[in-house]
Image: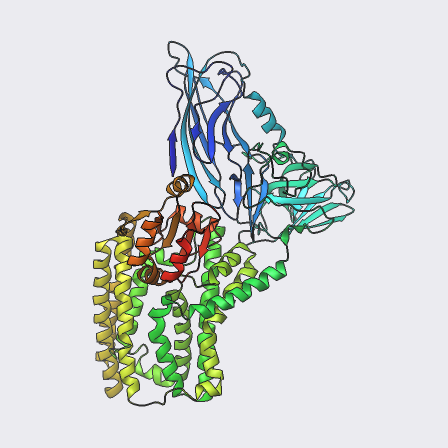
Amino acid sequence: MGVALACTGSLPHAAQAAQSAPVVSAHSTATLITDASTASATAPLHVALRLQLKPGWHTYWLNPGDAGDPASLSVTASGALQGTAQTITWPTPQRIRDASLMSYAYTGDVVLPVTLHLQPGTPDAHGWTTLNAQASWLVCEQSCIPEDGTFTLTLPTGAPLASAQASLFVQAAQHTPVPSPYPVTVSPDSVLHVLAPGLNRQSVGNAWFMPQERGQIAEAAPQALTFDANGLSLRLEPTTGFARNKPLAGILVLQAPDGTERALSIQATPQADTPAPAQTAALSGVPRAIPTAAPPANAPQPAPTRPEEQNATSPSPAPDTTAPTGSAPAEGGDTTGDLLRFIVLGLLGGLVLNLMPCVFPILAMKALAVARMGQSERKHQKQSAIAYAAGVIAGFTVLGALVMALRVGGNATGWGFQFQSTVFVGMITWLLFAMALNLLDVFAFLPPALGNASSRKHGLAHDVLTGLLAVVVASPCTAPFMGVAIAGALAGPPLTGLVVFAALGVGLAAPYVLLAFSPALASHLPRPGAWMDYLRQFLAFPLLGTCVWLLWVATVEGGATTVLLLCSGMVCLAFAAWVYGIAQKRQRHMGHSRSCTALYGVALLGLLGAMALLPALQQQAAQQPGTVQALPSGTEAFSQKRLDALHAAGKPVFVDMTAAWCISCLVNERVALNTDATKAAMARYGVTVLRGDWTRRDPAITAFLHAHGRDGVPFYLFVPAQGDAVVLPQILTQGLVLRTITPKP
């Protein structure tokens, strides 16, 4: 993160220049400014973070939309006068669309003010008042860079006197949303109703709503505009975070047919309640920015009246350019076409996932299922395949819904997030270890009586659980086509997202289902025999190998003590499985007895002993930062600041986003990235490799992935010294990497 210190020195600024020394980065210049060159207890002092952004870069509103983070500013006054302020008065933002994502942001010259109410303090010999401020902000173009700064500004105490920067505050006030003069309600099905008969097609050509809080509506979805005798309505697309019985606050922009705009701060009353005569509650702390850079000549935009839109530089991604209509804004694009495209990508991604290294941990289960299918009747083969597919589809859908729910709640999560939890890694390790013991005939999952009574139902349940486990274990990484599909699923409405995740499940399960339903393919299945028992036992060893890999992941995430706890749990599980197996054998040969009950109780104690280690595992994971993986020679740790500095210096950069729990990442490193030929080529062409380790949760890496439309690893990006950046596929070859980094003539 770019951290800078700006201070004014020992002498105060002249009365006409009320601004701090600047904090300068490659993409922005930040200063602390005030509207008065003196400090007074008789009038509020307006203080602002001024961000002068380079063309093409933007920063975010209070609700950044589908991606990004808002700026923050905390000001403390000391000396002759004292006080604190940190509530920004946000300006009306621009809408910036990137594919299926929508952001609310500012470009150009941005002013984010707070109001400081001063009280008498402890004056020094000269009667100065010193302002100390901490600020942080995120600037984005194709990539996002977190920046922050510390500012100091000293003012003399006296009657209010306008500063040279006062005009910036006047402009900011002019562009702050005004309280709505109209009553506004929101229906349970998320339709905004503005009760104003004077608002009709002749006065309003277009309208859109930007919620104050993220996660309430699908930001990028179309907002259908309709009129009736009582005013206008906007149909919003709700998300799981939409509260039907709570007010909905935000900014409603009304655009006249000539392109002029009015920004109204609203707090829509739930329709079941009686609205106030007029919604006058302004967006508390909703600030405004003042972009002033000139737009490209070819950037189509509606004719705006706000200075920031008249002079805003079109960033990449480009600002939304919705054309005025009388119904639905054009901003939504072809949503049906997008849904079909993401479904197709999901199907392809699921199919390719069957060939990815990340499915290696479940090959044993798949191989055993195929072998079992060969000794089943055709009817049972189909039932088994359908049960497995149901488990896979349910697993993808539930996991996708969980990711969407966490993101609606404000958590910056991505695909495979569960493997960033040491406790989850530990529980999966124990589960696979127990499955390996089962394959080695140490025990059976069900007691003999229950297993004999419902063997077929047990088999189908096993198929469903196999499908669920396949998704959980194989989800750490993404396959080709899968990354874009997941990004689209997480960006769209919940129902659309669930459909896309279900399509991923269909793709992953398709080969197994095809094998069961195709007589020609099924005829090639092996016939049952004694070899099945040996195969069953042999397939336990891939699961044990997976446990070893997961123990290494736990070492990276939580340190050596974590592995000690996990291995202790495995000993408890092995003891429980051994005793449980003895009890099953006694019951099978001698019937149920008190000794069997006692043995089952001892096995339960062993299982509880393992579970008792979970709190200690959680505590250890929280206290320990884990083990930092050693970087190969010539590779640096990723940071947005370092990437920006290298790119600004005209040096090529290869970004490698990886994780210890991503098997595809490890395979790519072995066969394509860490080879002698690749290292030599990187050195020959002066390419700096920046590796981001997402094994543990890292907000900076999450933001970088989201900025590039990805929600998981592996992710590879080559940024040449000149020209456009290149996104590489999830499966690498040495030849592909060499061709990508070789300078083009």
| Residue nearest the viewer, comparing 249 with 630 | 630
Q: In this view, does 181 lie above or below 503?
A: above
Look at the image and tell me whether residue 415 can be seen.
Answer: yes
- The residue nearer to you, when weighing 608 against 167, is 167
Q: Residue 188: in sight, yes or no?
A: no
Image quarter in which the N terminus is found: top left
Indicate how the structure is coloured in the image. Answer: rainbow
> Which residue is farthest front?
745
Q: Residue 207 at what x, y percent from top left?
A: 68, 44
What residue is rendered at 26% in x and 61% in y? 551
The percent coordinates of residue 689 (x first, y second) are 35, 49
Task: Name the side, left or right, on which 265 lies relative to 141.
Answer: right
* Quadrant hosting residue 465: bottom left
Q: Position of residue 605 (x, y in %)?
A: 24, 68
Q: In this view, does 192 lie to the left or right of 212?
A: right
How many numbered discs sit on the rendered protein? 0
Horizontal and vertical percent position of residue 100: 56, 53
107, above or below 627, in the image: above
**Is residue 530 found left or right of 22 in the rendered image?**
left
Q: In which quarter of the image is residue 279?
A: top right
Residue in view at x 69 percent, y 35 percent: 181
Tell me if residue 76 comes above or below residue 202 in the rendering. above
Q: Closest to the observer: 273 or 517?
A: 517
Residue for point 42% across, 74% down: 464
Instruction: Tell me: residue 307, above or below residue 457.
Output: above
